[in-house]
Amino acid sequence: MSVVYLVRHGQASFGAADYDVLSELGHRQAALAGAELRARGVRVDLVATGTLRRQRETAAAALTAYAAAPASQAGTGTGAGSAVAVDAGGWAGGTETDARWNEYDQDTMVTGGRQGHAPPAQRVSTSSGISSRSFQGLLDNALADWMARDDTGPGSFRAFSDGVAGALDGLAGRLGSGGTAVVFSSAGPIAALCGRLLGVGVEGLVSLNRTMINGGIAKIVCGRSGTSLISVNEHSHIDAAGREFLSYR
């Protein structure tokens, strides 16, 4: 049996010219996620991220916190053929990138691009001055429409979901029995994968996407009996730090 932890990136920069940058809070949430993995005694063999900056920055902050663990808590990976060592000096293993872990383009989703077709009056972006709550409402509607379409071509939700599932299968195949991977991704890919494993419909997928917490953790196990979702959106480490650390965007 192999284990894959999915960590959602820390808070990005909603309202800024470049959304794809962690805020100060986002960096702190990422560190909390890394410390949580350390506290659980997770021994990591593979680390993966998408290609987005907020995902890579989350990985860097989380792995720095993880690497600060005493040797008794975080040590050498045990999976077949790909173990990496961690010590107080920093993360000694490499981090692979895979664009299949990237988020959908949320601005395109609500502006009538290929992933959505909102009317011109709703053509907004994360930097347009709209409130996060209002943007989320537009995004929920666009996501529901995208997910419900009977389309399997490029840009479709089916292609997006299949891509994430393929990325997971590839990781599990390389890990082998007993290996562990940590993936730093976004709400969309994590929700798509968890929803797929739970067998939920469009409404459930949209809800999963909306409620993904920055720095939250999901756990998936892969073995002879198949792939199973063990937990989703774990965030006790965020709650323990204080209410001000809780965010969804």
Image (tube, rainbow, N blue to C red):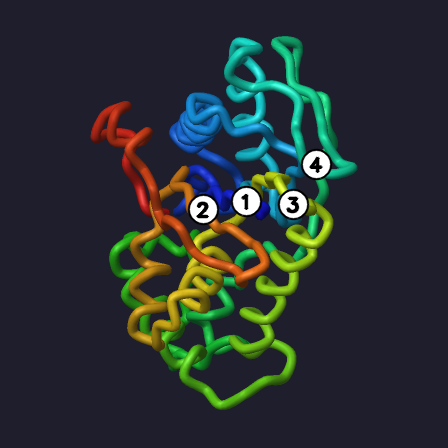
Q: Which amino acid does the dot numbered 3 rest on?
A: Ser
Q: Quadrant of residue 95?
A: top right
In the picture, residue 102 is in which quadrant?
A: bottom right
Q: Which residue is mark 4?
A: 95
Q: Nearer the viewer, mark 4 or mark 2?
A: 2
Classify mark 4: helix, strand or loop.
loop
Amino acid at pointer 4 = Thr
Q: What residue appears at the point 56 percent right and 54 percent down from the top-left corner?
A: 222
Taking the spot 57% from the left edge, 10% from the top edge, the residue there is 71
Asked if residue 31 lies left or right of residue 140, the reply is right
Distance in Å between CA atoms under marks 4 and 2: 19 Å
User: Which one is closest to the eye, mark 3 or mark 2?
Assistant: 3
Q: Nearer the viewer, mark 1 or mark 3?
A: 3
Do the numbered discs 3 and 2 sit on residues whose CB atoms are within 8 Å? no
Q: Disc 2 marks which residue?
A: 219
Q: Pick whichever of labels 4 and 2 is earlier in the sequence.
A: 4
* Near-viewer residue (107 or 170): 170
Query: Mark 1: which amino acid?
Result: Val
The residue tagged 3 is: 177
Which residue occupies 28% across, 23% down?
241
Measured in 3D between alpha carbons, the distance from the residue under mark 1 to the one under mark 3, in whole angstroms, is: 9 Å
